[in-house]
C-alpha cells in the first residue's frame, strides 16, 4: 500500500523536526475502496480518518452509499477508533 510509505515519511519528518509528540492526524480519500477490509488496511498503516467520496449515481445508489458509510463508520469506531467521514 502506497499510503504506508507516505505515513512512514510523515512520521520520520515529524520526528526529525521535533514534532513527533504533537497531535497529528492523517486523513485519506480512498477512491472506489469502500469495504471493511479497506478500513483495516488503512488503520494498520496509521491512517486516522477516511473520507468516502461516492461516484455520480442514482438516488437509490446515493442512499445505499450513505448507509454503507454509516456501517463503515460504526465498524471503524468499534474496531480501530478511526473515523470515516461519508
Image (tube, rainbow, N blue to C red):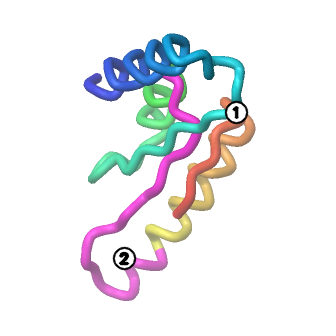
SS for tag 1? loop
Task: Say if the magenta span includes residue 20.
Answer: no
Tell me if residue 56 comes above or below residue 44 in the rendering.
below
Tell me if residue 37 comes above or below residue 83 in the rendering.
above
Give residue 74's mark. none
Q: Which residue position holds label 1?
A: 23
Tell me if residue 3 comes above or below residue 69 in the rendering.
above
How far apart are the alpha carbons under marks 1 and 2? 37 Å
Tell me the crowding category of disc 1: few under 14, some 14 to 19, or many 20 or more residues within 10 angstroms, Cα based.
few
Measuring from the top left, give residue 41's x and y in whole percent: 44, 26
Residue at x 43%, y 58% (from the top left corner): 52
Measuring from the top left, give residue 38's x and y in whole percent: 42, 35
Tell which of 28 and 63 is nearer to you.
28
Residue at x 49%, y 18% (from the top left corner): 11
Task: Say if the magenta span includes residue 61.
Answer: yes
Tell me if residue 73 comes above or below residue 47 in the rendering.
below
The residues colored magenta run: 45-63
Q: Which residue position holds label 2?
A: 61
Q: Is residue 68 left or right of residue 79?
A: left
Q: How many marks?
A: 2
Residue farthest to the front? 17
Q: Nearer the viewer, mark 1 or mark 2?
A: 1
Q: Is residue 5 left or right of residue 8?
A: left
Measuring from the top left, give residue 75's x and y in whole percent: 64, 42
Quarter placement of the N terminus: top left
Q: Is residue 19 left or right of residue 38?
A: right
SS for tag 2? helix
Residue at x 61%, y 54% (from the top left corner): 71
Residue at x 49%, y 36% (from the top left corner): 39
Instruction: Tell me if label 1 and label 2 are in contact, CB under 8 Å.
Output: no
Amino acid at each position: 500500500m502506497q499510503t504506508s510509505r507516505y505515513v512512514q515519511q510523515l512520521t520520520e519528518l515529524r520526528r526529525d523536526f521535533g514534532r513527533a509528540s504533537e497531535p497529528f492526524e492523517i486523513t485519506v480519500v480512498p477512491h472506489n475502496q469502500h469495504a471493511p477490509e479497506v478500513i483495516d488496511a488503512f488503520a494498520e498503516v496509521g491512517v486516522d480518518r477516511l473520507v468516502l467520496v461516492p461516484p455520480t449515481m442514482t438516488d437509490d445508489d446515493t442512499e445505499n452509499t450513505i448507509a454503507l458509510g454509516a456501517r463503515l463508520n460504526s465498524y471503524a469506531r468499534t474496531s480501530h477508533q478511526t473515523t470515516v467521514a461519508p
